[in-house]
Image (cartoon, helix red, strand yellow):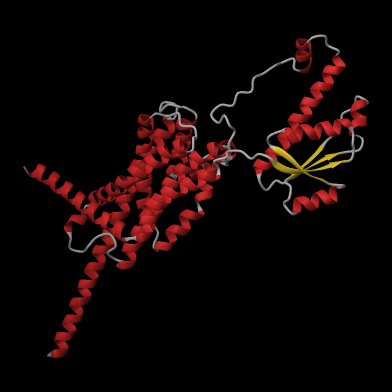
Amino acid sequence: MSIFHSIYQGIEDVCYIWRQEVKRIIKDEGVLIFFFLVPLAYPLLYSWIYNNEAVHEVPVCVVDQSHSFLSRQFLRQCDASPDVRIAYYAQDMDEAKSLVSRQLVKGVYLIPSDFAEKVNRMEQGVISVYCDMSLMLTYKAIFQTAQTVTMEMGNDIKKKLRGAYTAREEAISTRPLDYDDVAIFNPQGGYGSSVLPAVLMLILQQTLVLGIGLSAGTARDENPYRNLIPIGDVRYDNTFVIVLGKSLCYFMVYCIMGTWLSIVVPRLFNFPHLATWQTLFHLMLPYTLACIFFGIVVSCLVKYRENVMLLMVFISVPLLFMTGVSWPQSNIPGYWQGVSWLFPSTFGCRAYVRVNTMGATLYDVATEYRILWIQVAAYFTLACVVYRFQIYRSHKYALERLEFLRHKRQEKESNAQ
């Protein structure tokens, strides 16, 4: 009966801590914002901004010094493309630079005066492309449009020079090795479908850590020495019960937020969603637990409430780069790759993108999956260690306080005598 009584008492203590943490969350407006408002609103805002996926009708300026049939043909085909719109014709490059500096256009097509003459003499004609590199999407649209049009014009010139008799001979002469360009994983070539799935997983980690840190910071501000445990309440002496009770509260909230971020948002905005709910459940379970225990550890290491916000907001962009989604993983230095292993978002984002966007199975992301479970065990153990240290500090403070009060009472009694 003693074993069953201990188990029952442990469950009761966990539920008690869970209730206390729920009350603390409800009373703290900052925690409510990071636990509910930010995970609900941020994905909608980001997804809505990048909902167009790719830019179209990018305005460009033309400096046509050739004024020939070939230059006009090049400009007509560029203007007919969906990605570029010829907005201005400039007399020289100085005027074109002025239009770019005023952001009226995003790039310049410069056609030299000897363009048609070189092509007609069977020499290589050159068209210069100048792009505003502040936004890579506009650069991509301007450059690739010019590249595609020049290739098509080059193929037409080859056909005329070959003197082929049939369309099949023309096709073989211009493209001896044919190929089919099939875009996989991101058919529309959109920025949102490429990056936002990783951002959704990063939002889950950052909001969870911020909410846990703010909750601990509030308790620490109310009483810097008893932020975790009421002195004299024996049920708080068990660090396993403390961590389990608090994490149960956070897990309850992020079961809903995790479902919203990993399943609902990608379907609302038609991002690639190839994974089944069973696969996502098996992946999100260790990722959410790792983020929870990681947040508990961070909340114990950061002293002030505001420091958690400064720290996590500051490292958000570096964490996105270190996932290897927005920047190639092979180009990340080994030192920074080692640093990235400390954060659950690194492996959570990689695994989620491969599963939900690329159609991978859990077997394909077995490495990331195992590391997430390792992080769950490691951060759970570390959370118990830091909580035990805080309990030790609380007890030490209580003893010092009792000794101080006893000493003051003895002084008062001696003075009274």
Q: Is residue 106 left or right of residue 96?
A: left
Q: Is residue 168 left or right of residue 268?
A: right
Q: Nearer the viewer, residue 378 or 135?
A: 135
Q: Farthest top residue?
A: 165
- Residue 298 appears in the figure: no
Q: Nearer the viewer, residue 44 or 301?
A: 44
Task: Please identify the quarter of the rendering in which residue 28 is found.
Answer: bottom left
Q: Quadrant of the N terminus?
A: top left
- Percent across and percent down for residue 126 are 85, 34
Q: Quadrant of the C terminus?
A: bottom left
- Percent across and percent down for residue 191 are 58, 39
Task: Please identify the quarter of the rendering in which residue 277 is found.
Answer: top left
Q: Farthest left residue?
A: 1
The residue at the point 73 percent across, 37 percent down is: 143
Reply above or below: 231 against 322: below
Q: Is residue 62 left or right of residue 256?
A: right
- Percent across and percent down for residue 94 are 84, 51
- Percent across and percent down for residue 201 are 44, 42
- Residue 414 appears in the figure: yes
The residue at the point 27 percent across, 54 percent down is: 22
The residue at the point 71 percent across, 33 percent down is: 81
Reply above or below: 309 against 291: below
